[in-house]
Amino acid sequence: MLDVLTRVSDLEPVMSATPEVFSVLVNSRSHAEAGLALDVLREKVPERTLVKAINLREILQALPTFPCSMAVEDQTLAKVAGLTKDASLLKRRVPDVKGAWTAVTTAGNFCFDLFVVYRGKTLMWMPPSNSSDIVNPDVLKLVVRRPQILEDVIGLVQDMGLVFNPRFYLSLEDWGYDHAHEALEDFQALFF
């Protein structure tokens, strides 16, 4: 998986050239919308790059949504994950990214939210409640530019004792076949 994460930064030119379409492909909860965005990008972007984008989508979908219950108590999490207490947050520096922190708010074995702090700006991991995005769009931009942040978030989720098991794809066709049923359901929801 580390190979997939190190190649996330390869997606930055696509994100910069077509930010809205890229965001829909990687960050939309709707498989139908993601499929349409994929069709638009296929004309402009090499397949290998699009497979990387699809795999990033799978990573983001495999991460838990917050709030959620953890398999450990917050004191154990702090010890295992190397978190320090700062007001109501438990936080730690992201290795190799100057000015970056990951942080959580917890009580007992419950995690209320996950935050990414970068150069003094705090971003909530989850999008606003009425959003159809998987993660906060600003977080998506940040993890494409700084994949070490995503790696740190994955490590933190694993330290929480939560299951993280994304599917990875070698071709766009495999992804399309795997998610055809969900895409059809998404299309039906639009029209019925």
Image (spheres, grey):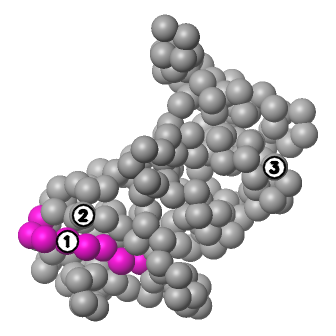
Q: CA distance from mark 3 to mark 2?
A: 33 Å
Binning the other alpha carbons within 10 Å of mark 1 as few (below 14), some (14 to 19) or many (20 upward) gives: many
Query: Which badge, 3 or 1, is on the more N-terminal residue?
Result: 3
Q: State whether residue 172 is above or below residue 187.
A: below
What number is the disc on residue 18? 3
Q: CA distance from mark 3 to mark 1?
A: 37 Å
Q: Which residues are magenta?
A: 102-109
Percent across and percent down for residue 107 are: 13, 71
- Amino acid type, mark 3: Thr
Residue 167 lies in magenta, yes or no?
no
Percent across and percent down for residue 52 are: 68, 48
Whether residue 192 appears in this view of the structure is yes
Percent across and percent down for residue 64 are: 34, 51
Q: State whether residue 78 is above or below residue 151.
A: below
92 left or right of 49 in image? left
Residue labelled with disc 2: 112
State the residue at coordinates (29%, 51%): 163
What number is the disc on residue 106? 1
